[in-house]
Amino acid sequence: QDNQPERVAYFGQMMKTARILINTPASQGGIGDLYNFKLAPSLTLGCGSWGGNSISENVGPKHLINKKTVAKRAENMLWHKLPKSIYFRRGSLP
């Protein structure tokens, strides 16, 4: 294991990457579950917007399901406190 966690944290902040593997083989460690449990097991890796992908994690079944959302307009009723009197200039109202 790495005995310099501050160095690992600094490296993680400086690199434009979605995953950083510490003391693990890149080809097996990057797919998750074999050498680490922080990455979901997958043979398809998402590299995020830096690599032109829409996700930055390992591609899994949840990414392959089409989910439809139906939305309709709803009035957002917010409370507003109005002053006691409102004054208008002549001609400002129809």
Image (cartoon, rainbow, N blue to C red):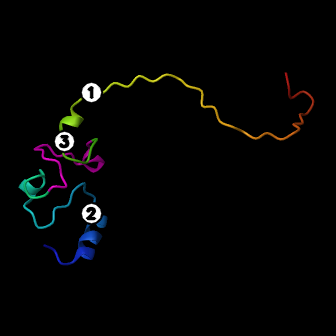
Quadrant that contains the N terminus: bottom left
Quadrant that contains the C terminus: top right
- Main secondary structure of the magenta stretch: loop
Q: Is residue 42 left or right of residue 88?
A: left
Upstream in the sequence, badge 1 or badge 3?
A: 3
Upstream in the sequence, badge 3 or badge 2?
A: 2
Residue sitting farthest toward the right: 90
Q: Which amino acid, by three-letter code, is at mark 2? A: Met
Percent coordinates x, y for residue 41 in the rendering? 13, 47
Task: Specify the quadrant of the image occupied by residue 34.
Answer: bottom left
User: Residue, x 27% and y 43% (percent of image)?
Assistant: 55
Task: Specify the quadrant of the image occupied by residue 81.
Answer: top right
Could you tell me if the residues under marks 1 and 3 are in contact, i.e. CB atoms within 8 Å? no
User: Residue, x 13% and y 58% (percent of image)?
Assistant: 36
Write down the residue under mark 1. 66
Element type at mark 2: loop
Write down the residue under mark 2. 15
Percent coordinates x, y for residue 73 in the rendering? 53, 23
Percent coordinates x, y for residue 13 in the rendering? 31, 65
Write down the residue under mark 3. 59
Element type at mark 1: loop
Point out the stretch of residues depicted in magenta. Answer: 37-53
Mark 2 burial class by Cα count in 10 Å: few <14, some 14-19, many 20+: few
